[in-house]
Image (cartoon, rainbow, N blue to C red):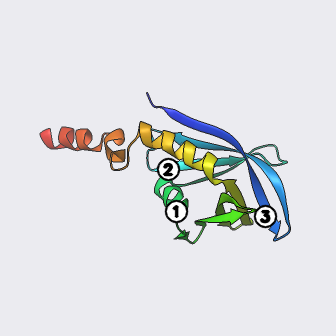
Amino acid sequence: MYTVVERELELRLILSPERGIPVPARLGYRTDDPYAVRISFHIDSEHPVNWTFARELLIEGVFRPCGHGDVRVWPSKVNGRGVVLMALSSPDGDALLEAPTAQVSAWLERTLRVVPPGSEGEQLGIDDGLASLLAQ
């Protein structure tokens, strides 16, 4: 059995400094993959676009710039409100997305209550599996 923590929210795809479009999205976290978060973007296509990256990257990105390569996250302010910016890069293209800090932080807090930082390995049963192997 595993626990799922999800939240629907509206992100903003930044097209230019003056222009962005709303993008419905779902944040997802599963205790059977405790190091990762998933974001599914519901764009005008048959299937959502899914991104998976480290939960720690999103947690840190709420407070300070972090990441490199395909996923970068950093805090900012837009019209006086806190936002989290996510720059995503793939062979199919690049996207800059803006998410409300309060909603992302509240969802992250729920994931941290389910699996506190530093206890992710316990969720995977690695110690039990290793002990079982060594006992043989």
Q: Amino acid at mark 3?
A: Ile
Earlier-in-chain disc, 2 versus 3? 3
Residue at 40% of width from left, 41% of height from top? 115
Q: Nearer the viewer, residue 56 or 128?
A: 56
Q: Whole-percent x and y of residue 50?
A: 66, 50
Kindly identify which residue carries mark 3. 14
Earlier-in-chain disc, 1 versus 2? 2
Q: Amino acid at mark 1?
A: Phe
Q: Is residue 22 above or below residue 127?
A: below
Whether residue 96 is visible: yes
Q: Is residue 40 left or right of residue 32?
A: right
- Local crowd size for mark 2, using a 10 Å CA cut-off: few (<14), some (14–19), many (≥20): some
Kindly identify which residue carries mark 1. 63
Marks 1 and 3 sit apart, C-alpha to C-alpha, by: 20 Å
**Count of numbered badges drawn on the protein:** 3
Residue at 80% of width from left, 49% of height from top? 43
Front disc: 1 or 3: 1
Whether residue 87 is visible: no
Secondary structure of the residue carrying tag 3 is strand
Kindly identify which residue carries mark 2. 36
Q: Quadrant of residue 47?
A: top right
Kindly give the residue lying farthest to the front in the view shown: 80
